[in-house]
Image (tube, rainbow, N blue to C red):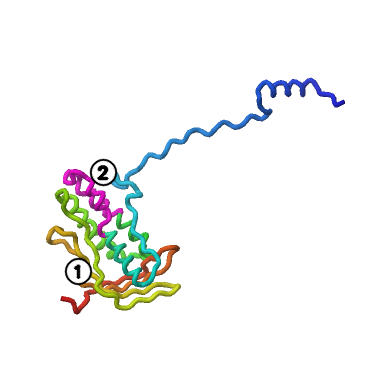
């Protein structure tokens, strides 16, 4: 019969009294408080979360579907933040810089998501021009009377030449931008509100396409 020493018996007794083993379980982790939401705009502006600045992507599809997706993404950028500004009631009481700051956040999100050239210095002027058009739309929404204003949209005039391979999608088409009804006079739309010839080269990026090159020139032959 195996002999139990006095020390071993004492340890066994203590373990039994404690109702646990000799090595207690570690204490539960402390409660972690959820992170406080942070606005992407300055403190004097209404709250805008990071998820509120979410670009419209270009999904993969047939060339004709991709034309629609490209125009949809551009429409998304030109109107980005309209719903947020509409909720700034009364909008006229919100500082004007909030519109400019929101347009800048939109420009950063869209250019970095939709374009391979987002860090190319040569393209910054192009992105600034689209940002300015977005800011125009937001400024109009900010001062619009309740129930007025809306979203500008693109209208496809004709598909000219399109193709798709595993390496990329190439699109050539005519389209025109239709500003929202009631947009103030004097706004500039880079002549996109006139028939415009688009040439777009896209490359695959996961489940989506990104623009590697885009060119827009006046399209002839339209009234």
Residue 7 sits inside the magenta stretch: no
Residue 96 sits inside the magenta stretch: yes
Res 73 → quadrant = bottom left
Residue 216 lies left or right of residue 8; in this view the side is left
Image location (x, y in percent) of residue 184: 13, 58
Q: Nearer the viewer, residue 45 or 149?
A: 149
Mark 2: few, some, or many residues within 10 Å (few <14, many ≥20)? some
For marks 1 and 2, give the CA distance.
32 Å
Principal SS element in the magenta part? Answer: helix
> Quick check: 148 above or below 213?
above
Look at the numbered disc 2 and give the secondary structure of its residue. loop
Residue 56 lies left or right of residue 205; in this view the side is left
Q: Quadrant of the C terminus?
A: bottom left
Q: Residue at x 18, y 76 (%)?
A: 222
Look at the numbered disc 1 and give the secondary structure of its residue. loop
What span is colored magenta in the figure?
78-105
Image location (x, y in percent) of residue 6: 79, 20
Q: Residue at x 43, y 64 (%)?
A: 205
Q: Residue at x 42, y 38 (%)?
A: 34
Circles 1 and 2: CB distance less than 8 Å? no
Q: Quadrant of the N terminus?
A: top right
Mark 1, residue position:
191
> Quick check: 3 above or below 168?
above
Residue 31 lies left or right of residue 115; in this view the side is right
Q: Which mark is residue 87?
A: none
Mark 2, residue position:
46
């Amino acid at each position: 019969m195996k002999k139990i020493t006095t020390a071993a018996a004492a340890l066994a007794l203590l373990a039994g009294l404690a109702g646990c083993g000799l090595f207690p379980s570690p204490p539960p982790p402390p409660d972690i408080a959820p992170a406080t939401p942070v606005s992407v705009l300055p403190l004097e502006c209404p709250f805008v979360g990071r998820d509120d600045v979410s670009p419209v992507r270009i999904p993969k599809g047939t060339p004709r579907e991709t034309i629609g997706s490209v125009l949809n993404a551009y429409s998304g950028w030109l109107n980005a933040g309209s719903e947020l500004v509409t909720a700034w009631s009364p909008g006229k009481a919100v500082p004007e810089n909030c519109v400019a700051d929101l347009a800048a956040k939109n420009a950063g999100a869209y250019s970095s998501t939709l374009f391979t050239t987002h860090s190319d210095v040569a393209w910054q002027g192009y992105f600034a021009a689209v940002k300015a058009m977005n800011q125009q739309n937001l400024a109009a929404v900010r001062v619009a009377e309740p129930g007025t204003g809306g979203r500008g949209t693109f209208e496809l005039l004709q598909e000219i030449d399109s193709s798709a391979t595993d390496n990329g999608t190439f699109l050539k088409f005519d389209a025109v931008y239709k500003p929202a009804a009631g947009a103030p006079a004097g706004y500039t739309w880079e002549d996109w509100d006139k028939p415009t010839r688009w040439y777009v080269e896209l490359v695959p990026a996961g489940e989506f396409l990104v623009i590697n090159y885009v060119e827009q020139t006046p399209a002839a032959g339209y009234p």
